[in-house]
Amino acid sequence: AQKVTQAQTEISVVEKEDVTLDCVYETRDTTYYLFWYKQPPSGELVFLIRRNSFDEQNEISGRYSWNFQKSTSSFNFTITASQVVDSAVYFCALSEEYMFSGGYNKLIFGAGTRLAVHP
Amino acid sequence: SQTIHQWPATLVQPVGSPLSLECTVEGTSNPNLYWYRQAAGRGLQLLFYSVGIGQISSEVPQNLSASRPQDRQFILSSKKLLLSDSGFYLCAWSVSGRATGELFFGEGSRLTVL
């Protein structure tokens, strides 16, 4: 069965520190997708990144970077030089490719990691 | 551009009362629609999804139901709320036909059942 584990419940850092949020997933499929979402205090989930299982290249977007390692079933997220605005709950999610007509996306979410960045 | 709205944002209801949360999407046609629930300190659980008008699939047995009376309208209902129905409910949509596409979420509705 699919499962996403975010072992870090809460992380507290001081501004400008680097921080890594861990994500470990379980799936039996060879084709799957991994996501990271950010949930700021307002509550709305904001999409950050999608990765498919055939692309293990690390990705960098500004201060954000993602490390995907199939060998360890991990998809970790690093924020460099953290800022107060990065304070939020971050969710990792897994989706296996469904071939239904019309297609739908069943995301399995981890429990989330609450990141607090202090000035 | 596409937008998604859900309301009400906050709701406090007594046990046994009915519930209706509404979600609408604009700027796209035939979206896949979803209802998720986020319990305090926990991840998101998929409750219902819909790939078309009148087509509802339930992921978990529960006290809630969903309906899709129009292409871009998704409603979450209950006839009699339970204390365990309290939580943060999120509506989301994705592009139809793209089973690997990302989900776009609404602002959420916080339900407290007393």
Image: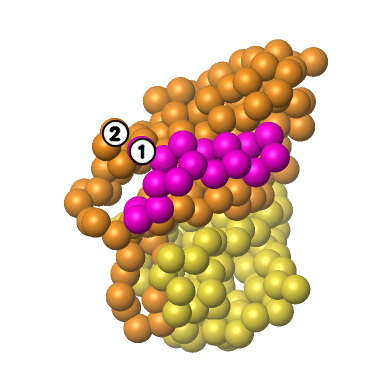
Chain colours: A orange, B yellow
Residue located at (60% from left, 85% from top)? B29
Q: Residue B69, relative to residue B33: is it above or below?
A: below
Name the chain under label 1: A
Q: Distance between the residues labelled 1 and 2?
A: 6 Å
Identify residue for label 1: A69
- Give the quadrant of the C terminus of chain A: top right
Disc 2 on helix, strand or loop?
helix
Residue B17 quadrant: bottom right
Question: Can residue A11 be seen here?
Answer: yes
Vertical placement of A88 versus B31: above or below?
Answer: above
Q: How crowded is mark 2: few (under 14 residues within 10 Å), some or many (20 or more)?
A: few
Residue farthest toward the front in the current orientation of the protein? A57
User: Which stretch did the figure color magenta?
Assistant: A53-69
Marks 1 and 2 in Cβ contact (< 8 Å)? yes
The picture quadrant where one finds residue A73 is top left
The amino acid on which the numbered mark 2 sits, given as a three-letter code, is Thr
Labels 1 and 2 share a subunit? yes
Residue B111 seen by the camera = no
Give the letter of the chain under mark 2. A
A99 left or right, relative to B95: left
Q: Residue B62, how many percent across, how many down?
A: 35, 56
Label 1 neighbour load within 10 Å: few <14, some 14-19, many 20+: some
Q: What element carries label 1?
A: strand
Q: Return the mark for residue A72.
A: 2
Q: Does the magenta stretch include residue B93?
A: no
Q: Does the magenta stretch include residue A68?
A: yes
Q: In this view, does A21 lie above or below A12?
A: below
Q: Residue at x 61, y 26 (%)?
A: A115
Image side of residue A44 versus residue A37, left or right = right
Answer above or below: position of A76 versus A16: below
